[in-house]
């Protein structure tokens, strides 16, 4: 709902319904926005742990909203992040991020341009609903890792240009999703910068040892994530187990 922010409401409105697979009985109704935010950051952290250099200490954040705050916490859990360099189109949003992250244990620096944030970072996370590329492949340097996760699943939305994908070893969350819904991947294919073969490796295959992850300290790696529904379901099921175990939530009988 693109007009929501003007009235102080979140742009994304979503809900997750969990059902019992044996009976079809509804088990839970959960807020989708929070779950999607944290599972997105968690997936980026898993990719960062698998693909980035272990000594990565500087995090670059393109975007400074709620997804950026979740990513700072998640990436810092898997890498020794000492500094976060943050850029936002809205300077007030970047300053608000800095104020809220004051207790993160990291130095928070505000970048004047996207290039400044990218070039300073060991790990870069793009976290914006951009239509046109914000990050340029010519800015990348050897050894960096990128988590490209912000653009919505639409063929003409992308945060990075084709050169980013051409220069990087690319790992996707889902081959099918990347080839049908990732604007960055589809644009790079249209422009001839990459082939479909460069989008074949899924993160799950890297974690299972089926495909290699990073192959050298100077390699540029890139996790292109559009998001897959099974991640929301798995995270919601985990939340439900915790809620039931702690006696939280509101129980409503729908079958009476």
Image (cartoon, rainbow, N blue to C red):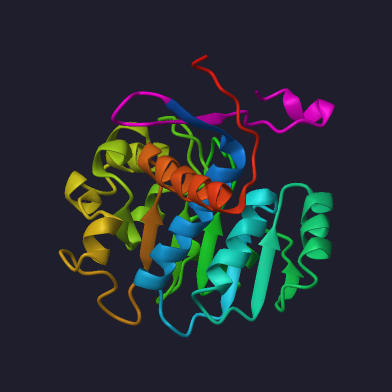
Please give the name of the residue rendered at 20% of the width and 44% of the height, measured from the top-left corner.
Answer: 196
Residue 56 at least partly seen: yes
Q: In this view, does 5 lie to the left or right of 223?
A: right
Q: Position of residue 167 (x, y in %)?
A: 34, 62
For the stretch drawn in magenta, the main secondary structure is: loop
Q: Is residue 48 placed above or below 182 in the rendered structure?
A: below
Q: Position of residue 12 (x, y in %)?
A: 62, 31
Please give the name of the residue rendered at 44% of the width and 56% of the height, measured from the top-left corner.
Answer: 43
Q: Position of residue 142 (x, y in %)?
A: 40, 76
Q: In this view, does 148 lie to the left or right of 219?
A: right
Please give the name of the residue rendered at 67% of the width and 68% of the height, measured from the top-left corner.
Answer: 85
Residue 102 figure quarter: bottom right
Instruction: Look at the image and say whether residue 162 sits in the magenta stretch.
Output: no
Q: Is residue 173 placed above or below 30 in the rendered structure?
A: below
For the image shown, how many numbered marks are present on the structure? 0
Q: Position of residue 32 (x, y in %)?
A: 56, 36
Q: Is residue 25 placed above or below 95 in the rendered structure?
A: above
- Residue in front for this viewpoint, 210 or 31: 31
Please give the name of the residue rendered at 20% of the width and 47% of the height, measured from the top-left corner.
Answer: 195
Q: In this view, does 97 lie to the left or right of 172?
A: right
- Residue in front for this viewpoint, 63 or 68: 68
- Which residue in the rendered view is the most extreme toward the top? 256
Residue 62 at least partly seen: no
- Which residue in the rendered view is the most extreme toward the front? 256
- Residue in front for this viewpoint, 251 or 104: 251
Q: In this view, does 18 lie to the left or right of 168?
A: right
Magenta residues (range): 1-25
Q: Quadrant of the N terminus?
A: top right
Instruction: Look at the image and say whether residue 14 sits in the magenta stretch.
Output: yes
């Amino acid at each position: 709902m693109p007009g929501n922010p003007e009235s102080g409401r979140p742009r994304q409105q979503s809900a997750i319904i969990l059902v019992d697979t044996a009976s079809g009985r509804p088990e839970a109704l959960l807020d989708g926005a929070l779950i999607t935010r944290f599972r997105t950051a968690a997936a980026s952290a898993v990719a960062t742990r698998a693909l980035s250099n272990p000594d990565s200490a500087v995090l670059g954040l393109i975007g400074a909203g709620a997804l950026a705050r979740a990513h700072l916490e998640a990436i810092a859990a898997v890498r020794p992040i000492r500094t976060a360099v943050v850029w936002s189109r809205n300077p007030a949003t970047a300053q608000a991020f800095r104020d809220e992250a004051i207790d993160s244990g990291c130095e928070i620096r505000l970048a004047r341009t996207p290039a400044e944030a990218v070039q300073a970072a060991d790990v870069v996370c793009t976290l914006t609903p951009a239509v046109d590329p914000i990050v340029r492949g010519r800015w990348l340097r050897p050894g960096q890792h990128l988590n490209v996760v912000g653009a919505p699943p639409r063929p003409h939305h992308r945060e990075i240009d084709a050169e980013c994908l051409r220069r990087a070893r690319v790992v996707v969350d889902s081959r099918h999703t990347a080839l049908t819904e990732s604007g960055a991947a589809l644009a790079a294919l249209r422009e001839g910068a990459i082939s479909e073969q460069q989008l074949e490796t899924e993160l799950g295959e890297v974690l299972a040892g089926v495909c290699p992850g990073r192959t050298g300290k100077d390699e540029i790696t890139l996790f292109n994530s559009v998001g897959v529904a099974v991640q929301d379901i798995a995270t919601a099921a985990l939340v439900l187990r915790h809620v039931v175990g702690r006696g939280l939530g509101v129980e409503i009988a729908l079958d009476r």
